[in-house]
Amino acid sequence: HGQSDARTHASPQRTTRGMLRTVARNASRVVRGPHHTPKRGMADGPPGGYFADGVQGEGHVNGRLFNETPPPPGQSRKWEDWELPWYLGMGGAAVILFFGLNAKPETSATAWAKEEAQKRLAAEGK
């Protein structure tokens, strides 16, 4: 029991480091003033957090996307003016990409080497 436990006593370097950190923190508070709030970085997220209530206001919770009220039962929703061109444009772009990318020529070195090897084997087989 006469021995001192290393876990209960901090090393002199650790104590000095902690004291310097505290002094630097207090000095920066003196320079900036007592009411200074630290600046938020880009990685800090929105002020209330990612799952905050947002800007709707107190007690405004309806659970509808874009605050759009649903049509009465038995009626369909009326499209906005921009919706038809948007859906046609996105659908057309998807079709063009699908067929265009499937029809593009194979230009990889592996495909060229395979074709060249087939040509040479066919020429040797004569």
Image (tube, rainbow, N blue to C red):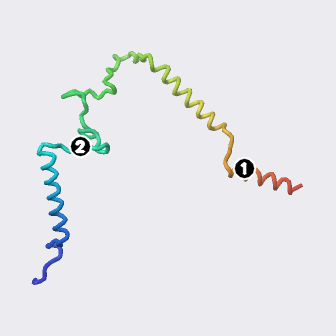
Determine the secondary structure under disc 2: loop
User: Up-down: is 68 above or below 111?
Assistant: above
Three-letter residue code for mark 2: Lys
- Which quadrant would the C terminus be assigned to in this image? bottom right
How busy is the neighbourhood of tag 1: few (under 14 within 10 Å), some, or many (20 plus)?
Answer: few
30 and 125: which one is in front? 30
27 and 17: which one is in front? 27
How busy is the neighbourhood of tag 2: few (under 14 within 10 Å), some, or many (20 plus)?
Answer: few
Residue 2: percent from the left, percent from the top? 10, 84
The first of marks 2 and 1 along the sequence is: 2
User: Up-down: is 94 above or below 81?
Assistant: below
- Which quadrant would the N terminus be assigned to in this image? bottom left
In this rendering, the count of numbered labels is 2
| Residue for point 16% across, 68% down | 15
Residue 75 image-quadrant placement: top left
Determine the secondary structure under disc 1: helix
Residue 56: percent from the left, percent from the top? 24, 27
| Residue for point 19% across, 68% down | 14
Residue 11: percent from the left, percent from the top? 18, 73
| Residue for point 13% across, 82% down | 3
In the displayed structure image, the side of residue 51 where residue 22 appears, left or right = left
Q: Name the residue under label 2.
A: 39
* Number of the front mark, 2 or 1: 2
User: Up-down: is 109 above or below 12?
Assistant: above
Three-letter residue code for mark 1: Trp
In the displayed structure image, the side of residue 110 where residue 119 appears, left or right = right
In the displayed structure image, the side of residue 69 where residue 85 appears, left or right = right
- On residue 112, the disc is 1
